[in-house]
Amino acid sequence: MTVFKIPVSVLVVLYSPDADVLLLERADHPGFWQSVTGSLDDEKEPLVDAACREVFEETGLAIASTDMEDWGFSQNYEIFAHWRHRYAPGVTENTEHVFSSRISRASAVRLSAREHLRWKWLGLEDAAEACFSWTNAKAIRELGRRQFSS
């Protein structure tokens, strides 16, 4: 039996107190940089639980749900054609829910080798420019307005 991905996901922007953003390079597409992302494991999985789970799976960082900021914001986007095989036939769009969490730059990041090759910290604008996903870039720019504008 084929198990398809649920077209509901989380995007988690991890950032430092001095406005740097942690980005991860995708193992399946070298050169594609992104924040932590991932689909729900189950349609009943609470979004904040998915956000915490994905951060742990992708970075090894355990973030409590109370330290995860739910933006109460989601974006719909068309799933890239080269990833549509992961979803049920006919599914072409995903709904992505945005979260963020402040972490120390000294955090011990341990990548999932299956998912990511490298990680790096970049300032807000450089991080937004480095992301291949327009929704990720938009969220990073919004983080700057939310957390770091006077």
Image: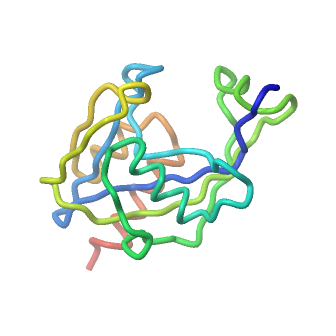
Residue at left 41%, top 28%?
26
Residue at left 65%, top 25%?
83
Q: Is residue 93 left or right of residue 135?
A: right
**Is 70 above or below relative to 104?**
below
**Is 144 above or below relative to 22?**
below
Q: Is residue 116 left or right of residue 95?
A: left
Residue at left 28%, top 58%?
15
Residue 94, x across and y down, in percent: 70, 45
**Which residue of the protein is positioned furthest toward the front in this rendering?**
1
**Which residue of the protein is positioned furthest toward the left in this rendering?**
106
Q: Quadrant of the N terminus?
A: top right
Residue 52, x across and y down, in percent: 45, 59
Q: Nearer the viewer, residue 71 or 62?
A: 62
Residue at left 41%, top 63%?
100
Residue 59, x across and y down, in percent: 33, 44
Residue 53, x across and y down, in percent: 48, 53
Q: Quadrant of the C terminus?
A: bottom left
Q: Is residue 136 left or right of residue 108?
A: right
Render colour scheme: rainbow
Q: State the count of labels.
A: 0
**Which residue of the protein is positioned furthest toward the right in this rendering?**
90
**Is 98 above or below relative to 67?**
above
Q: Is residue 90 left or right of residue 120?
A: right
